[in-house]
Image (cartoon, rainbow, N blue to C red):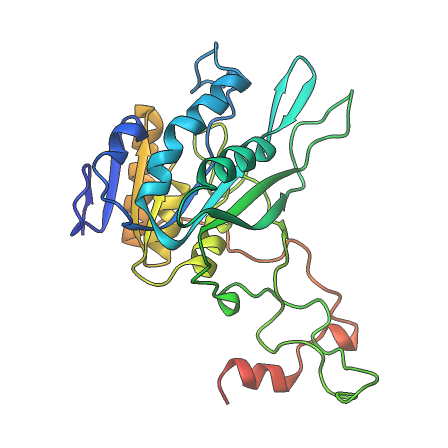
Amino acid sequence: MKIYKHYNDKFQNVLYCGDCKKFFKEIPDESVDLIITSPPYCMGKAYEDPADDIETFKKQHMEIFPDIYRILKPGGSVCWQVGYHISESCIIPLDFIVYDIFTNLSKDKIFPLILRNRIIWTFGHGLNSVKRFSGRHETILWFTKGDQKIFNLDAVRIPQKYPGKKSYRGPHKGEFSGNPLGKNPSDVWDIPNVKANHIEKTNHPCQYPIALPQRLIRALSDAQAVVLDPFMGSGTTGAAAVIEKRRFLGAELNEQYYNIAFERVSMAMEGTLKIREDKPAIKPNLNSAVAQLPNEFKMAREGK
């Protein structure tokens, strides 16, 4: 298996080095199942034009929306991960802007974009502020193109804090109150971000962890679905897609980051890419009886 540089519906993985707007022209209508990305915040990062500002962010999103909508299948999902644009000590929540643009531009469509979740991604480390509370979260807007078709909850359940807890009243009194497979991860995800000592760290300055798109891919697509990242960066979404046995399409304008993405996706295809497993950062107190996994749950997970 190899990586291709231009689209063909028979190619498993395609990594395009160039502007995503040009790459979109190669992609047929309604051919993508899931779009996951984190666009530039237009704050003068190394990979951005120093002249970019919040108006640039708005313009870029309005320009790419028609193609984003065109190539997404009805019922498919869009996951847009953003934080804050900061200018002259003023912060602007970018998810507000994305929501406004995406919903307004699609409201007259046959299948309008519908916001299904506003997921909070929280992490423990980052820059320390002295004039405001330190930022420790970003957001993921999950839209569907019309009616939602796929939500694989069992694929993304996480360990319960108290799996041995039982109902103390009502018709299910004395029975275990949780699901044997784990609990719904909710719309607040505590996943460590990628800093200097993280096993996934590359030279990209704004890299998110593989566990983030991996959870979205598991929940919002099936095997062999087509996953697209128009702002591929270091290839995190691509690596996650390969690991989860999906097809991947990605575009990256910066050649340095494209080469990093190419290497990481290649390693994921070979099974040699090192990743941090998606697991709770804090383990429950196993000295508590209700924090221990009941034997009945273990048997249910094993299909007995």
Front residue of this view, candidates 268 and 171: 171
- Write the residue at 44% across / 41% down: 108
- Write the residue at 59% across / 41% down: 139
Query: Residue 47, relative to residue 148: is it above or below?
Result: above
* Residue farthest along the front direction in this orientation: 108
Query: Residue 127, relative to residue 144: is it above or below?
Result: above
Left or right: where 67 falls relative to 157 = left
Front residue of this view, candidates 90 and 144: 144
Q: Give the number of callouts.
A: 0
- Write the residue at 50% across / 30% down: 206
Left or right: where 260 falls relative to 26 = right
Front residue of this view, candidates 303 and 185: 185
Left or right: where 288 falls relative to 220 = right
Question: Quick check: can you spot residue 232?
Answer: no
* Residue farthest along the top direction in this orientation: 51
List x then y, in percent, for residue 291: 73, 72
Where, by quadrant of the figure, is residue 165 drawn? bottom right
List x then y, in percent, for residue 264: 34, 42
Query: Residue 96, relative to residue 149: is it above or below?
Result: above
List x then y, in percent, for residue 224: 29, 60
Left or right: where 46 falls relative to 118 = left
Front residue of this view, candidates 8 and 59: 59
List x then y, in percent, for residue 94: 58, 30
* Residue farthest along the right direction in this orientation: 169
Where, by quadrant of the figure, is residue 37 drawn? top left
Question: Quick check: can you spot residue 241?
Answer: yes
- Write the residue at 30% across / 24% down: 255
